[in-house]
Image (cartoon, helix red, strand yellow):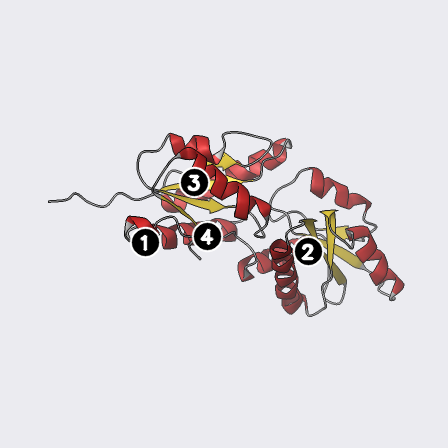
Amino acid sequence: MTGPAVSPAPVLVAHGTRSRAGVDTVAALADAVAARVGAVRTAFVDVLGPSPAEVLSDLTGPAVLVPAFLASGYHVHTDVPREVAASGHRRVTVTRALGPDPALARILEYRLRESGWYPGDSVVLAAAGSSDPRARHDVRRAAAMLAARVRRDVPVGYIATGSPTVADAVQTLRAAGEERVFVASYLLAPGHFHTRLADAGADGIAAPLGAHDAIADLVAQRYRRAAISSRTPPAARRSTVP
């Protein structure tokens, strides 16, 4: 007779930042998710520790990794699988990234309104940027979702990698006659990238998405779907879950 199935351990995987406010945001998100699904472990793929491999090495039962990334680029497609392999853990399910998702578009609009944006004002979606075309595709989808909510075309501007830059995107809208231009920050938490947006020349900069309840709900949703999937035969357990 077998015992009851063990629920997989939730592991929230973030990028990592030297910003105390950024670290606190990830911690607040993990706490909010824990209130929905139980104790959550946090790992980082860069800058900070523990790494996903270190967290997984401390677990004996099944685990579900939820990448807290807004697009699926190098970190999601390369770093996370490499960390899982390095851990030697054989019962890991990795969900897809958080974005793009309609829930994030709703938060982006909310943050814009907080910053002083009004319907009719133009918007640039500011993303960190990536050399991975899959990540850039995800960002364009996120911009389209936001455009449907604000009822304006929303061009994308990149902060670190890619073109146009956020400042160039803002300037293009100014040259086209737009009087008020706002930047929607497609970043999860405060940090160096968000600070750089102050020089974009916009009329307002929305706050990052932050530890919003809707994001905690999204992480919990990803986890629950993966937890169900993890009850399938072992050979299928390490496939990515939508």
Position of 125 compared to 219: left or right? right
Around disc 4, counting alpha carbons within 10 Å, would you say few (fewer than 14), some (14 to 19), or many (20 or more)? some
**Residue 78 sits in quarter:** top right
Q: In this view, does 129 lie above or below 109?
A: above
Q: Name the image quarter holding the N terminus.
A: top left
Q: Give how far across and how far down residue 238 sits, in percent.
A: 38, 48
Residue occupying image coordinates x 43% and y 40%: 11
Residue 226 horizontal/vertical position (percent): 38, 52
Query: What residue would you read off at disc 1?
Result: 228
Residue 46: percent from the left, percent from the top? 58, 34
The kind of residue tagged 2 is Leu
Residue in the image at 19% along x and 45% along y:
4
Q: Which of marks 4 and 2 is nearer the N terminus?
A: 2
- From this viewpoint, is residue 196 visible? yes
Three-letter code, disc 1: Ile
Residue placed under numbered mark 3 in the picture: 11
Nearer mark to the viewer, of 3 and 2: 3
The label number, if any, that marks residue 112 in the structure image = 2
Instruction: Give, as a three-letter code, the residue at label 4.
Output: Asp
